[in-house]
Image: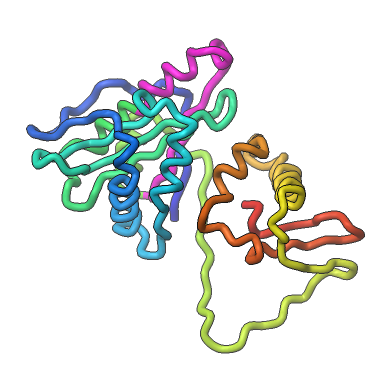
């Protein structure tokens, strides 16, 4: 059960030191494959159902970051990558941090160092134009009651949202869906016009949820449309020619 912890960017900078031989630096553009593998190992250690993100997805994210300042890798004494973190401005006043420690390197101080770095980097980003002077919130997604949860709480982060993952067995026949009267369902055709309609549906659906999503079409498509995306698997519900819903919108 992942959760989102949030605070204004006032988490303590500095903090615990990493074990001797470990260090941090900016990732290199050619390390996308190693970072993707590291993150996948870390996520799978907490959630066996976690899907793998591709190197191309990391390159897409890095293309909008200042890679030298907005991301860090932790290195082990043998030079291999042992941790990764990034801070991204989702929209003015809302920053998102991701941080991972590779299994086998837990307890070395990597997690605390990356959390402290992300808080410091978020403060610096929040102080730059056009964000300067406006209230800002830094968000982390973590597993409840895990080490990251405890470290964030110790740094004055608070719980603001909980996500639950729903799953069911696909063995045997599935019940036929029952659609409301007047609703038709079809696959997305994947055209730019259709994707903009899906984006508009998502923005409207979540406008009153958790202070609104507030993603531009460009940011939304960068997050959801990549080389693994098959829009034909996106089911669109329409009524009287108006899009009423899509599972892809989340």
Q: Is residue 212 visible?
A: no
The residue located at (53%, 22%) in the rendering is: 136
124 lies left or right of 228: left
| Residue 227 at x, y percent in the picture | 52, 54
Look at the image and name its color scheme: rainbow
Q: Is residue 131 above or below residue 172?
A: above
Taking the image as shown, residue 72 lies to the left or right of residue 176, namely left
Q: Residue at x 29, y 29 (%)?
A: 26
In the rendered view, does 141 fall on the left or right side of 242?
A: left
| Part of the protein shown in magenta | 118-144
Q: Is residue 70 magenta?
A: no
Where residue 189 sits, quadrant-wise, is bottom right
| Residue 87 x/y as whole percent | 42, 31
Q: Residue 186 location in percent, x, y?
A: 76, 68
Task: Tell me which residue sits at (31%, 44%) in the image.
Answer: 100
Considering every residue shown, the one lying at the far bottom of the view is: 172
The N terminus: image quadrant: bottom left
Any magenta on residue 141? yes
Report the side of 168 relative to 22 (left or right).
Answer: right
In front of the other: 102 or 165:
102
34, above or below 16, in the image: below
Residue positioned 49% across, 31% down in the render: 64
User: How many numbered discs, if any?
Assistant: 0
Position of residue 51 measured from the top left corner of the image (x, y, whole percent)? 42, 60
* Residue 142 in sight: yes
Q: Quadrant of residue 234?
A: bottom right
Name the foreground residue: 166 vs 26: 26
């Amino acid at each position: 059960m992942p959760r989102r912890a949030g605070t204004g960017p006032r988490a303590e900078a500095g903090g615990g030191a990493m074990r001797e031989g470990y260090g941090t630096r900016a990732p290199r553009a050619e390390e996308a494959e190693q970072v993707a593998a590291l993150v996948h190992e870390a996520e799978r250690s907490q959630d066996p159902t976690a899907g793998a993100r591709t190197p191309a997805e990391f390159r897409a994210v890095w293309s909008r970051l200042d890679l030298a300042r907005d991301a860090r890798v932790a290195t082990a004494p043998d030079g291999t990558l042992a941790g990764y973190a990034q801070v991204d401005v989702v929209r003015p006043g809302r920053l998102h941090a991701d941080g991972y420690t590779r299994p086998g390197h837990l307890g070395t101080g990597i997690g605390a160092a990356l959390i402290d770095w992300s808080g410091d980097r978020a403060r610096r980003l929040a102080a730059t134009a056009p964000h300067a002077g406006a209230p800002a919130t830094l968000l982390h997604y973590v597993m409840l009651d895990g080490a990251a949860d405890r470290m964030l709480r110790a740094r004055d982060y608070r719980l603001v949202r909980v996500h639950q993952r729903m799953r069911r067995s696909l063995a045997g026949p599935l019940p036929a869906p029952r659609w409301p009267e007047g609703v038709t369902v079809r696959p997305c055709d994947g055209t730019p016009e259709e994707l903009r309609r899906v984006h508009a549906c998502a923005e409207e659906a979540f406008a009153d949820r958790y202070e609104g999503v507030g993603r531009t079409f460009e940011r939304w498509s960068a997050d959801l449309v990549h080389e693994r995306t098959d829009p034909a698997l996106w089911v669109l519900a329409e009524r009287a020619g108006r899009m009423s819903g899509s599972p892809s919108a989340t």
